[in-house]
Amino acid sequence: MKLKNILILTGAALTLGACSDFLVEDCQTGLPESAVFQDIDLIEQNLVTIYNNVRGNYVTQNGWLPLSVGTDETQSGAYQALKEGAERRSLDYGGSSMNSTNTYITQVWNGHITQIAQLSKIIRYMLPQSESDSIESGSQREQLLGECCFLRGSLAMELVMLYGRIPVHDYVLNPDQKMDRKDLDLCWEYVFTDLQNAANYCPKKNDPQRATRYAAMMMLARAYMSAPEDLGLRDWEKATEYLKEVCENGPYDLVEDYADLYDYTTPNTMESIFEWQFSPTSSANCLQWLTGSRAAQGTIPDEGEGCLFAGYDHCLPTEFARTYESEGGLWEVGDQRYDVAIRTDFTHNGYTADYSSVQWEGLGDDYDELEPHIKKYEDPRNDVHAADMGAESSGKNSMYYSGKNICWLRFGDACLLYAECLNETGNQDYALEWVNYVRERGFGWVYKKAQQWTSMSKDEFRQKILDERIRELICERWRRFDLLRTGNYPSLVTERNKWANRFQSLQDYNKLFPIPYDELSQNEDMDSSDQNPGY
């Protein structure tokens, strides 16, 4: 079986030599790059390295934070928004420091483009090398090729949504093609092709630790829901088709208890389509550090950074996302997802945190270290009193070592995307069934008739499903992409994000990040004229 129309995407990073950090095996063994990628076992090892590198976007603040704060769902803590450096503050409300030298924006670009380049190397050598060469159906080679296409297509889609036109290189058809920014329709066609190939070649099974056909189809549906309407690339029918396969024919279902999704004792549930794997001792993530409270760290005796909910207030829910409808917010009385996702109680081990340790900040009325925080990523194994909470201690006693897995793709998300597609394609009755199924779980399966969604206009459904996605997915990194694909960025951010609302500096052009200066200055096929408008 020969692979058709595999397209190689990369940026300037494709010029990396065989002794890059990625190809450690190459450097140590002295094998040329071509020899490394002709050995299926070495390909497997290198692909595992890429999985770990992509997972690394959740390990440090530079990869995760710029895509999480600055929405209508989550915002920076007051200290970060008002006192920390201008680059950091710009993530919420734009301004002059949202520019091509912004470290955070550059890190996101580099993190994505580098892994795309490495995946492209693997794909290049896994393609049929001659007319007699073929890819056997069901072979390890086919599976690895599908996984590479899944990761590359997913990363490329994020880049296109965040930065617009990107450099694309097609080694198969034109090895001399320039590395300039390509037209947007071409960029999206490359994304579609990669994810379609992933759907064709990834195994059709349930394995949340590796890319599968179902993960590829879910991401492909998201791509067709996100592609620009003005270019005629958005396709609700195709997205519906792919999500139907995931939701109706896949081996997934909602877990009975929403809390199990964030319990370290129940990883890789039947709801997990793709889940990043972590451990508090060997491969921890930084999300508790980013979402916890410094007031807790400073005022609960004998705890410090070993307090269950300690952190640095980098990412907090907006007022809209942390309050009930009676207060003008999002949440309905009886929705059990609130207590799972949002921490409101800062009492621990007999002590209640207060603001005394952060008074030096001088934030006046803006102190928010004890306002509701994100609770999903708390790992009791890292608490000083882990044993008292029935948890096996990690021995780290530190907020820096959250070892809980992170769902990247899960069934609850797929159900809501499917409902959105069904509404757009004229089947709202069926869409309501899928939304109400997710909501029923959210209310603990005790679902009052008054809480059920009933027939409404298509436009009202669009608004309501966008809010429902916050309830189900708050602080799971999808909100910026939801706002971009629905055309609600920056309007809802300016309305609901405290800092964007206060400073009123977000502009329409901020929908796209600036192209990093390093790329413009080091890529010989790009220059300052390639910068996104407004920057």
Image (cartoon, rainbow, N blue to C red):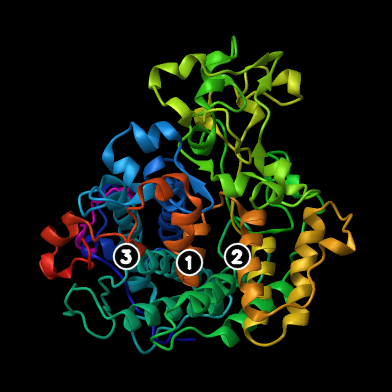
By secondary structure, the bulk of the magenta-drawn segment is best described as loop
Q: Is residue 286 found inside the magenta-colored segment of the image?
A: no
Q: Position of residue 288 (x, y in %)?
A: 54, 34
Mark 1 is surrounded, within 10 Å at the Cα level, by few (under 14), some (14 to 19) or many (20 or more) other residues, namely some
The residue located at (34%, 56%) in the rendering is: 506
Marked residue nearer the N-terminal end (1 or 2): 2
Viewer-proximal residue among 482 and 254: 482
Q: Is residue 89 visible?
A: yes
Magenta stretch? 14-26
- Give the residue pinned by disc 2: 466
Disc 3 is placed on an element classified as: helix
Name the side, left or right, on which 362 lies relative to 344: left
Q: Position of residue 437 (x, y in %)?
A: 80, 65
Q: Nearer the viewer, mark 2 or mark 3?
A: 2
CA gap, disc 1 to disc 2?
Answer: 10 Å
Three-letter amino acid code of the residue under disc 1: Asn
Marked residue nearer the N-terminal end (3 or 1): 3
The residue located at (19%, 66%) in the rendering is: 531
- Give the residue pinned by disc 3: 163
In the rendered image, the vertical position of residue 279 relative to residue 206, given as above or below: above
Viewer-proximal residue among 405 and 17: 405
Disc 2 is placed on an element classified as: helix
- Give the residue pinned by disc 1: 488
In the rendered image, the vertical position of residue 331 relative to residue 359, given as above or below: below
Q: Position of residue 264 (x, y in %)?
A: 68, 39
